[in-house]
Image: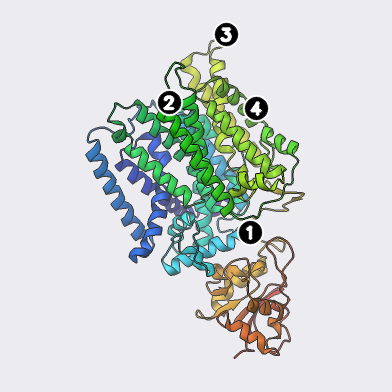
Amino acid sequence: MILDWVAQSGLFALAAAVVFVPGLLIGAALRLRGMTLWATAPAISVGVLAGFALLFPFASVRWGLLSAGAGVSVVAAVAWLVTRTLRPNSPSTPPRELSRGSLLLLAAGLVVGGGLNAARLMTYVGRPDAISQTNDAVFHLNALRWIGETGSASSLDISGLIGADSFYPAAWHAVTSLVAVDVDVIPTAANMVALVFAALVWPVGIAFLTRIAARGGVRIAALAAALSAGLMAFPQLMFEWGVLYPYAVSIAVLPATVACTILIFRTWRRSVLGDGARSSVALILASGAGVVAITLSQPSSILIWALLVMLWATGTVLLPEHPRERRAAWSIIALIGGWSVLAIAWIALAYLAGPVLWKPYRSVAGAAADVVLNSHSQLPAAPVVSALLILGLIVALRDRRMLWLAAAWVAISVLYVVSVGTDLPVIKRVLTGPWYGDSFRLAAVVPLIVVPLAAIGLHGVIRWAADRPWRVTAGRTRELALAAIAAVAVAGSVAVALAPVVLLRVAAETDEQSRYTLNDRSYLSEDEYELLRRVPDLVPSDALIIANPSTGAAFAYVLGEREIIPRTWSPPQSTAWDVIALHLRSAGEDPAVCDALVAYGSPSYVLDFGIGGTGPGEYLMPGMTDFDGQAGFEEVAREGEVSLWRIDACD
């Protein structure tokens, strides 16, 4: 298996370049330096690329690597001119000279965290070209082919894939479409982008946030990077559940965006009067790009960004470092205004998301146990991380500068408990509605707070060891930290080796296999996959296919490279479709069926992937199966129990 992934190293390098290079160019032009530059680069990249994808259609510019690269070059040039004008001689983030030992420690943490995240994701996915056997994957992968055909990756246009014209956050699609250089590599490109965000973006982002939140140095950042793979709730869960590619992007760029926003206010407060705006310009622009990236990936995640920033701001204002420090009236007014805006946005998104909320499947006591054991959404408990979390909470509660982290942990935990353990309509909708009351989505937010607190706890243990009677000198604490990272590496490697594929539990049911496994029990069977791959040789390029989409047949758009009705997993809502779903096989005898087919472009081929099902996201369509012997249908190809038919009844 590993050789299959190595063979795709070129595509992985392209994915890493698309995610990092635009942000590195623009960030360097803004004179960001060090960890600030590397941690914020993905957020800047996603924000700028998604922004250009939104704007290009208005200028009739086709989306692609060349146009996106040109846009990034222009932004970098403008950023250089702005910072050159405002601060001609000094960097936006003063560089800190790091010793070779500190760089080694940070590199070790990033390699361990990134490596463990990569190992977990690759073993679960299996082959680099594997497809998530979930409903949402149909839309996401088909959307990448649609972008290639239409030349638009705009959040205002992408719903055109399913014949709609509504807003849909398409940042992930804009980024991934630049990696999917050909329709044949679309599934692989999706997996490579997932790997980049899991193994590269998340570890450096959470390390940066931990460093800023704890006001620590490289040591605590390195510990956080190593622990970034300590919880399966993120990044792993988001590539299993859903599959939620856009939401995963929004969470991955959240840490750096939160940290960057905090730095803006710290820089402003430390700056000489009149110089605050100039010294904060780069951070403001980087943070703004991150906010755009989050919003155009998954708008609900912007609430988490605002919640964490407001908790930090509230702690800073109400619990200043120096107790006698006077609180300015404007700061209190700003806090009230900020919380008010957050509350309004929260309620608005809760009701815009619609009334559908996931049902509870845990008791409140069970949900509370999940919180303590870090076994959210019935994932395996993480006892070591939980122990470090408790230590980190103790440290945070004793240090007013970090008290906001403890408050954030309580707030996120409450949201999770409400989502998974209660069924109170109004409260549940108001608090968890932006996430559809989905405990899996809220569980993915938990590592954003738990990992920094666990790193703070582990750092506290190292400092304690350095002060013991056996007299480990302060200069040797780096070696202790390196030993701790090595221990994380060993424990993580053993965990992956013993349980390479951790199966999801949803309510009382447990997955039988990885959701990327292709066999007779998967959403798309092996026979169906093989038949779809043969479609380009069996169906003319201008032909239209129809099928029951909930059987996986809608993958024909990306795998078979042919038009199909519909292009997503859910069927159209119309009387004409109802006629087709119930009576298509009778088209040779019932003229009403041909009339109904006209409403959908008169498709000339139909895929028979069976009658369908009655589970979530499945539909029974008896008219779209059993064509053998029916007048008006000619068999074109067959793979096992599935087949492709030409519709002659309406000629």
- Dot 3 crowding, Cα within 10 Å, few <14, some 14–19, many 20+: few
* Discs 2/1, front: 1
**Residue drawn 56% across and 59% down?**
129
Residue 364 percent across, percent down from the top left: 73, 38
- Dot 2 crowding, Cα within 10 Å, few <14, some 14–19, many 20+: few
Which residue type carries mark 2? Gly
Measured in 3D between alpha carbons, the distance from the residue under mark 2 to the one under mark 4, in whole angstroms, is 28 Å
Farthest residue in the top direction? 469
- Dot 4 crowding, Cα within 10 Å, few <14, some 14–19, many 20+: some
Q: Earlier in the sequence, mark 3 or mark 1?
A: 1
Q: Earlier in the sequence, mark 2 or mark 4?
A: 2
Q: Earlier in the sequence, mark 2 or mark 1?
A: 2
* Discs 4/3, front: 4
Which residue type carries mark 4? Ala
Front-lying residue, 519 or 467: 467
Q: Which residue is mark 4?
A: 387
* Discs 3/1, front: 1
Image quarter hosting the C terminus:
bottom right
Q: Which mark is residue 101?
A: 2
* Discs 3/2, front: 3
Measured in 3D between alpha carbons, the distance from the residue under mark 4 to the one under mark 3, in whole angstroms, is 24 Å
Q: Earlier in the sequence, mark 4 or mark 1?
A: 1
Side of 534 where 218 appears, left or right: left
Say whether marks 3 and 1 touch (CB < 8 Å). Answer: no
- Dot 1 crowding, Cα within 10 Å, few <14, some 14–19, many 20+: many
**Residue drawn 36% across and 49% down?**
22
To which quarter of the image does residue 261 belong? Answer: top left
* Disc 3 element: loop
* Disc 2 element: helix
**Residue drawn 58% across and 25% down?**
392
